[in-house]
Amino acid sequence: MNIGGEILMMLKDEISEIDYNRYIKQLSFSTLQSKSNYAVYFAPNALIANYIKRKFSDKIAHLFEVKTGTKTLVSIELKSAKKGKVPQKIEQKNEKP
């Protein structure tokens, strides 16, 4: 398990099971974009991202500091759509007889 996953497991012990299952469990840690003092998590949608930023980002940052001894800036970002795929607009045409 990576450091981001370990931090989320630590957070699980400090928050309600409902908050963990509904919000935190949906986060994924980016090992590629994270650095020793900067942690990047991806959320599946803006609602969850904003809720986690408001309610848990300070607590996540604190847990990183406890675990690593380094003050860490936590960023909650949206998962980007797969590259190369353009959303298709679905139109429904009404045909007159």
Image (cartoon, rainbow, N blue to C red):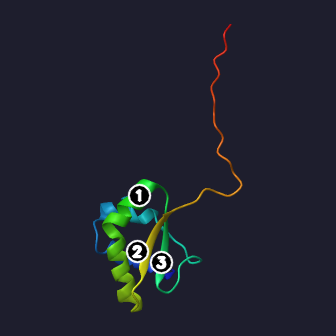
Pick whichever of labels 1 and 2 is earlier in the sequence.
2
Q: Which residue is mark 2?
A: 8
- Looking at the image, which is closer to me, 28 or 61? 61
Residue plotted at (31% across, 60% down): 18
Q: Percent position (x, y) of residue 56? A: 33, 69
Q: Residue at x 59, y 77 (%)?
A: 32
Disc 1 is placed on an element classified as helix
Can you tell which of label 1 and label 2 is closer to the viewer?
1
How far apart, in angstroms, are the residues tagged by discs 1 and 2? 15 Å
Q: Mark 3 highlights which residue?
A: 39
> Is residue 25 shown above or below 71?
above
Is residue 20 shown to the viewer in this render? Answer: no
Q: Give me the disc on residue 34.
A: none
Whether residue 80 is visible, yes or no, is: yes
Q: Residues within 10 Å of mark 3 (few under 14, many from 20)?
A: many
- Other residues around mark 1 within 10 Å, as few (<14) / some (14–19) / many (≥20): many
Q: Which amino acid type corresponds to the residue marked 1 in the rendered image?
A: Ile
Give the structural element (helix, strand or loop) at label 2.
Answer: helix
Q: Position of residue 28 (x, y in %)?
A: 50, 68
Front one among 16 and 89: 89
